[in-house]
Amino acid sequence: MVLNKTYNLYSPAKINFYLKVIKKLPSGLHKIESFVALIDLRDHLQITETNKTATNIKFKGKFAKSIDNFNNSITKLIFFLQKMYPILEEKKFNITIYKRIPTGAGLGGGSSNAVTIFQFLKTKFKLKVSNQNLSKIYNYIGADSKIFSDKNPKFIDGIGDKVQSVTQKIKLNLLLIYPNKPNLTARIYKMNKVFSKQGTNIIARKLIKKNILNLFNFGNDLFNAATKSNPSINQLIKFIEKQKICDFIRMSGSGSCCYLVFKSKKNLLKCEKLVKTKFRSYWTAVTKTIT
């Protein structure tokens, strides 16, 4: 890496087509099954190697207010990597993250940021990362980190650490709606009382080649807990369903962001206007899958 040269990186958000909670494990984590795809809503990251005495990380933008500049997924990751790879030990960086992905939204922004930084450092400094170390790094970042290892859609098993990529192209027009009230993932899982039998991913693998839209019918087991914690989610969904304007409306992950699926781009834009009129404080974004 050239000293003082700034590199621009982009980390994408994700959506869950469905999310099934299988059981709570003794560790306190949960075994899940899900299918996810990445979308073109992305955070913008800038990284520069400097000769300063410490790495400096700043978060900017509308969704940066709740993020600690000193205690966050990127700070922890760099410290972890520096202990693992001597070449990084004396390296210091200026990193700025322009947050376009809402926090506490179920879109995976924090993990995506950290994975993007890891992949960049791995390439720039030619880190030799064994499979064992790769697993350690992804586990350290978070259970959902492997979702962002490449742009392919994925089936998720285990605590989110077991992934199977699919090569099928998925092209969906989406409207994201975030009620500007975050959901804390740990709290939503703790509140959850809905559990499913294992096997949804098996069924979904058979359906995916016929019609990708079938996967939305499996639902999200965290929905009840999320809406109990954040009633604005249910209010939004009831309003949208009455309009009969979109093909599907679903909550991603543990929420609180919901996404609407449209075959018609015209209906998507019409719906966004309706939402902005009814829920003026809510954040919206037009996006699409990037597979």
Image: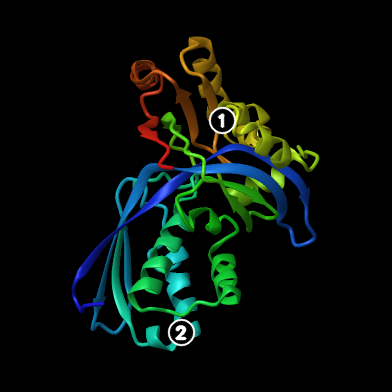
For residue 83, side relative to residue 87 (left or right): right
Question: Does residue 24 lie above or below 174 as drawn?
Answer: below
Say which of 85 and 186 sits in front.
Answer: 85
Circle 1 packing at 10 Å, graded few (<14), some (14-19), many (20+), is some
Residue 149 in view in this figure: yes
* Residue at image location 47% in from the left, 18% down from the top: 246
Amino acid at the residue labelled 2: Tyr
To which residue does mark 2 refer? 85
Residue 88 place in picture, x, y as percent:
39, 83
Q: Residue at x 51, y 16 (%)?
A: 239
What colouring method underlies this structural image?
A: rainbow
Q: Which residue appears farthest toward the left when viewing the image? A: 4
Callout 1 secondary element: helix
Question: Splitting the image into 4 quarters, where does residue 220 fall?
Answer: top right
Which comes before the other along the chain, label 1 or label 2? Answer: 2
Q: Report the residue marked by disc 1.
A: 212
Question: Would you say the residues marked 1 and 2 are in contact, meaning their CB atoms lie under 8 Å apart?
Answer: no
What's the amino acid at mark 1?
Ile
Q: What percent of the width, then of the height, locates residue 29?
A: 71, 56
Q: Residue at x 76, y 45 (%)?
A: 22
Quarter of the picture holding the C terminus: top left
Pair 1/2: label in front: 1
Picture mark count: 2
Give the x, y percent position of residue 50.
24, 79
Query: In the image, 43: left or right of 138?
Result: left
